[in-house]
Image: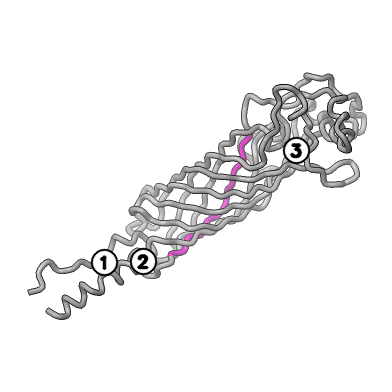
Amino acid sequence: MRNYALLCLLLPVFSVAQESNRFHLTFFGGVANYQGDLQGRTFTFNQSNLAIGAGLKYDLTPHFAIRTGINYGTVEAADNQSDQAVLRARNLSFQSRILEGNLLLEYTLFNMEDKKISPYLFGGVALYHFNPYAFDSSGNKVFLKPLHTEGQGLVAGRKEYKLTQFAIPFGGGIKFRITNNVILGYEIGLRKLFTDHLDDVSTTYADPFVLAGQDNIGLKAVEMSYRGGELKDGDPVYPAEGTIRGGSKYKDWYYFQGLTLTIGLGGGNGGWGGGKGSIGCPKNVY
């Protein structure tokens, strides 16, 4: 009977060990891309760039888990890759590094304690930072937001956009159990944004004289807001104020896709901690 009593005293230790089986390290490696005014394809590998990420996952049940992580990648696009002549004539381009932190709820269709493969879905909230830039005709890197390329902050009704914003991430994938403690997956994650300025292109051309009137940066703002004159046989005449530069009706998106690696921290079966082999204290010890 003393052995039973000792077992009851040790139950908190077993519980902590069992609870640790619910925690997992997560790693991501793949590519990042975006959809917006300089990239007309909804989903493509064209002009994609390397992306990486890492995080932590906690199993709530055999099917539901909470994930949190950090992702880093670069998105870019250029009009010279477009199949539309009118966009190629505009000759705009951009790049932006994206640093994202997220909190996600994941749903796995099958219990990975019983199955080796399962599809899954996820959704949640993210906070991300971006800062669009381009290279001028001399090859110099130029950040675009400070130039107010569409008159943001200079023209009535056009507010400056923020470089750190919230997004709604969602997506899905498929996961494979490699060992008791390691799961390999492939996932696609989309980010619904609340800005149309990820690429610094959104509405119409501003008055070039208004842009040029900015101290120290005026001429550079005019140069970077319309670049048709840099093309061979391109039109050097700056478009009239109000001419369409981008489409503000639809917001920009960015997305990640690639491989995921999940490693259990508690050893053992590396999965749902409250499943197999749970330990209970006997109701009567005498």
Q: Identify the residue shown where x is 20% and y is 78%.
A: 6
Q: Nearer the viewer, residue 181 or 207?
A: 207
Q: Identify the residue shown where x is 82% and y is 32%.
A: 225
- Tag 2 residue: 269
Q: Which residues are magenta?
A: 252-264
Q: Identify the residue shown where x is 78% and y is 38%.
A: 146
- Tag 1 residue: 277
Marked residue nearer the N-terminal end (1 or 3): 3
- Give the residue type that dot 2 points to: Asn
SS at mark 3 in the image: helix
Residue 7 x %, y %: 21, 75
**Residue 207 seen in render:** yes
Badge 2 vs badge 1, beta-carbon distance below 8 Å = yes
- Give the residue type that dot 1 points to: Gly
Is-magenta flag for residue 55? no
Badge 2 vs badge 3, beta-carbon distance below 8 Å = no
Position of residue 181 relative to residue 240, above or below, is: below
Position of residue 23 relative to residue 8, above or below, is: above
